[in-house]
Image (cartoon, rainbow, N blue to C red):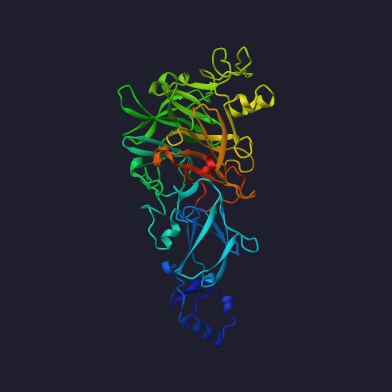
Amino acid sequence: MLVRMNQPGVSALGLTVTVKAHMLAPVSLHRLTFFAILLLAPVTCRADSAPQRNDYFGIQVVDDQTGRGVPMVELKTTSSVSYYTDSSGLIAFYEPGMMNRDVWFSISSDGYEFPKNSFGARGVKLHTRPGALSRLEIKRLNIAERLYRVTGEGIYRDTVLLGRKPPIFLPLLNAEVTGQDGVLNAVYGGKLYWFYGDTTRASFIMGNFSMTGATTELPGKIDPSVGFELHYFTGADGFVRAMAPMEGEGVVWLFGLTVLPDETGRERMMAYYQRRRGMEETLENGFVVYNDTKDQFEKFKTLPLNPPFFPTGYPFRATGEGGVEYIYFPTPYPDLRVKADRASYLDLSSYEAYTCLKPAAGGGTNEPLQLNRDAASNLVWTWRKNTPPLNLNDQQALIKAGRMKPAETPFRLRDASGGKPILLNNCSCCWNNYRHRYVMIASQLMGASMLGEVWYSESDRPEGPWSEARKIITHANKANDPHDFYNPVQHSFFDQEGGRVIYLEGSYVNTFSGNPRPTPYYEYNQIMYRLELSDPRLK
């Protein structure tokens, strides 16, 4: 028998065995006979082949209220190996040493809770029989229901491994995208457009940091409860290409995406842009307009750096006084607006802030802040040009200094359950036909959870008052394991049953929470939730 020394391996009958020189010295007939028997013996395991569908033990975790599979549930063995359910709520379990035996799985998920056993542990013992499926119910604590991951790799990974049919055509990898930041939407040119921020890729550590884009069919042709396929704009290498390419260093972010007719009546898609050093300083800002021929945004107007206000967040339309239609922008409350025409949108001097500040001499920012009170010392809030919105830090400082009472501001959200103040990071706001009010979906900037809490509130007017809110989503079940969920946006174009059922999407990431443990597959990606406004907990 010939044995090659210090080679990576010797293959016989599909079994690869690594053999080192020290294993054979001194070489004896007895030892050579042993190796010959080892290499020529019948092999009962497929060491060189991947597990087949029937080799996996399937686990599905379902919502106890709806029976639907729950994504992003962690199952952990006593070996500290973690598995996460895919967007069908499925796990395809295969561990060579752990099959056909009883295995304990600890079970946890933000906003959900698995029941305790007699020892107080939240988990279950399962017999891992290949080809079998265990179905587990988990209690939903969130008012909103987690539906699926919109972006990234392996959205339906375990569904595919178990041989089941996923609801989308590209369930594993689409345009090489592994992670994407917050979304902007617009219905334009007979399509629904989706624009995402910084995007990571499968083949290299660097990705696309100048906005990425995709289209889908119009909302009426999509069932948001099931999911949808993003048709990305890609380059020659198959990866998503830059939708707002610009010369110079830094990333490019878009804000306040809007569609308005130009002077000829033709619809144009526009946005405000910043080219900046990540979370640091802005290097350039202004307006961009979409070029339909090139399918990308191009610079339309560059503005002086860091204006006191600009179109931000998720704009929505509403009728103001005198029947005038405006576009409103959350900053983070909906306290900035402009008339719904293209010329006004592209002219920052046309914007109005809902403010209690006195107008500055010559316009611009008031320093120090001067409050506008009437003869009876009542604080006067009004829509005013050339005056920035009162940011929440300044508002908190005025309240702390005793210059303003909390009840005097329309922007005073508190937890309806306990009265604790809620400091917003941002929000989206839409009119809801079911509640006959404006509905706000907002993320909280407060405490250890940072951006992981999402709140629901209502008001008769865009400018409020916004006073009470209910927490609908948390990503901080455990104090030492919080996660961020920022830029939540309600997709009002997906409203169902007259607005009784709404859908919202947000960015899931550990960047700001201080949590050093990323969630495999879900990290830095978009997750879709569903909320039923008939839920009595929202009263």
- Residue at image x 40%, y 44%? 240
> Is 534 located above or below residue 281 in the figure?
below
> Is 5 located above or below residue 282 in the figure?
below
Residue 139 image point, x, y percent = 54, 54
Residue 408 image point, x, y percent = 61, 24
Q: Taking the image as drawn, is residue 496 in sight?
A: no
- Residue extending farthest to the right is 401
Depth order, front residue of 169/381: 381
- Residue at image x 57%, y 34%? 468
Q: Taking the image as drawn, is residue 220 in sight?
A: yes
Depth order, front residue of 492/394: 492
- Residue at image x 30%, y 24%? 265
Q: Quadrant of residue 500?
A: top left
Residue 183 image point, x, y percent = 45, 39
Residue 535 image point, x, y percent = 50, 44
Q: Is residue 330 left or right of residue 301?
A: right
Depth order, front residue of 107/135: 135
Depth order, front residue of 488/242: 488
Q: Is residue 291 left or right of residue 252?
A: left
- Residue extending farthest to the bottom is 29
